Image: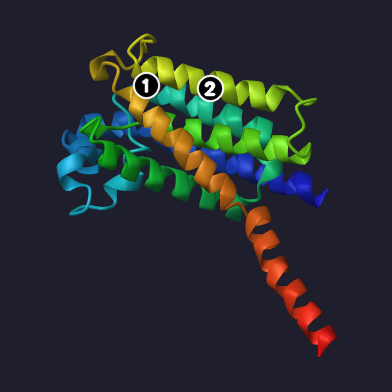
Amino acid sequence: MHKVNEAIQVIICSLVLAAVAIWLPYYQVETGSLLNQYDFAQALAWQEPWRLVTAHIFHLDARHALYNALGLVVVCVFFARHFDVRTWLNAILVIATLCSILVWLVGVPERFVGLSGLIHGLLVMSLLLEWAKQKYSFNDWLPPLSIALLTLKVVLEIAGLLDSQILLSQGNTFGYVHGAGLVAGVVAWRLHRRRLASLAITPSKSTATDNSRE
């Protein structure tokens, strides 16, 4: 029951984030230059570091925001059981920040906005957590197949062989954002609480062994 309540809380958090993302394009119309202050910009990434995170919440228009907001909620509904609010927020921050840093390192695109990189990272992280429950057995073929297809999709995007009808103004550069999101998702999976817990247990076992020898 406690796990169910935690999953519901995570879904509520995703709905709040999705609602903010959908509302922002309408607010941007009133403010005019708001998007330019909070998007990712190569030249301003370190002078204005909030852009590393805020870029993921802003969108080009209401349609862009709606599609990404729905994607975020769907991923969270399917995989909320793997998180509580704290670990979900940690994953969001890690994926968003690292995704932006990787885009900065690659240098493409010079500017971007949108939740899609974050969604890709959260999805691959969730699939890895799901597969981990099966001890990475290939008998449970759905998670590894999904990860492989997701990776193939991003490769095709980067190669310019798969276009986005929502992001035509960005050409094929959105594939680099999605690819950065995948890498960030793998890192977030490694930093998930179960991984950290296992690291914490190891030293204590070693200490116990040393004490018994004494």
Label at residue 10 = none
In the image, what residue type sits under mark 1?
Answer: His
Disc 2 is placed on an element classified as: helix
User: Mark 2 near mark 1, Cβ–Cβ under 8 Å?
Assistant: no
Left or right: 177 as drawn, with respect to 86 = left
Task: State the image quarter where residue 130 is shown.
Answer: top right
**At 24% across and 30% down in the image, what residue appears?**
109
Left or right: 203 as drawn, with respect to 174 = right
- Look at the picture and state if 200 lies above or below 53: below
Q: Residues within 10 Å of mark 1 (few under 14, many from 20)?
A: many
Which quadrant would the C terminus be assigned to in this image?
bottom right
* Between 84 and 189, the one nearer to me in the picture: 189
**At 77% across and 40% down in the image, what residue appears?**
135
Percent of width and height locating residue 56: 37, 37
Disc 1 is placed on an element classified as: helix
Residue identified by numbered label 1: 64
Task: State the image quarter where residue 125 is shown.
Answer: top right
**At 24% across and 16% down in the image, what residue appears?**
169
